[in-house]
Image: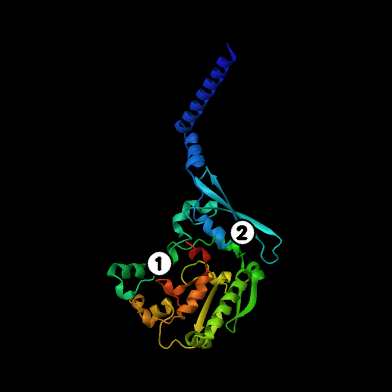
Amino acid sequence: MTGKGKSLLVLLILLVLSVSAFYFCFATETGKRFINSKLSKKEPAELEIFRKCYPDLTFDAAFDEEVSDWKITVTAPVFVNGKETKVRDFYWADGRLLPKEELSRKDRYWKMIYPYRHLKDPALMSGEEIERVRNFSSADNRRNGSGSPMFFFDFLYAAKSRIIIEDHIVNTTFLGKKTRVHERIDSILKQVEKEILLVAESDSTVKDFVASLKSADCYHWREIAGTGRKSFHTYGIAIDLLPKSLGGKAIFWSWTKDKDPDNWMLTPLSARWSPPQKVIDIFENHGFIWGGNWVIFDNMHFEFHPELLKN
């Protein structure tokens, strides 16, 4: 056989082997999983939002064929000194970032990224929408319904226990009020304060808002009332700006529900106390969401979730 003939024979053998391997991939479950994971699976696009919002963390993604989901390995500095690191594996779980043992219960958790600005004027709500809010806010749903997955936040803010997290809580002031915050957001909150005070120099509404504040409470180790789940105040990343006087207006859905159990959700927006829009904008520009945008409204409340403002 000539050299050219040998070359053609080698090419033919390689072609047969390639076709056989290709058939194996599609004809067997192992092969199908291989093809799906290697050729058609793409890293979750929303993972890039987390990378942008938490730039000091690394998010390494690898597809886990055993559970057919993306394993996200998160590495974070131990923020109290910035020299050590900690690592934990999560699973994407359609945007929930769950530990492996929680994958079978993923429907009990909300997705971590969602459109938070969904407040609707109560005057425009249909009867069906009103009933949905009633059911959502019911004691049974709050205790037994789905809720925010806290696993990533427990890891990020070192909230395994009260003793551990308090190594990361710092004393500070906000708009002249003493408070305690997580060290991760201390400098961010100081920038928010700086911008609010700057605007207050030329805006009387913002100036009056600052002067009217009674307290600015942030860190408090506790559960969300009636839920059995941690409050984001537990992480020291939520702050309540309570004024000295509400002027007869509503500020928090639960307090309003105590007075009007059936129709609290119909409280007109004009009858709810709110910070000035410029203050809300400054907070949002620095990664804080405002509780006044929730159907279950909490108009004094701001919470650090930059991932909800980047989607």
Q: Which residue is mark 1?
A: 140
Query: What is the x, y in percent for residue 36?
Result: 48, 40
Would you call the spot at circle 1 few (<14 residues within 10 Å), some (14-19), or many (20 or more)? few
Residue 143 visible to the viewer: yes
Disc 2 on helix, strand or loop?
loop
* Amino acid identity at mark 2: Leu
> Within the image, what quadrant is residue 129 found in?
bottom left
Whether tag 1 and tag 2 are in contact, CB under 8 A, the answer is: no
Quadrant containing the N terminus is top right
Tell me which amino acid carries mark 1.
Answer: Asp
Provide the residue designation for mark 2: 57
- The residue lying furthest to the left in this view is 127
Nearer to us of marks 1 and 2 is 2
First in sequence: mark 1 vs mark 2? 2
Q: Nearer the viewer, residue 227 or 14?
A: 14
Compared with 287, 212 (above or below) is below
Image-quadrant location for residue 86: bottom right
Element class at badge 1:
helix
The x, y position of residue 306, in whole percent, is 52, 66
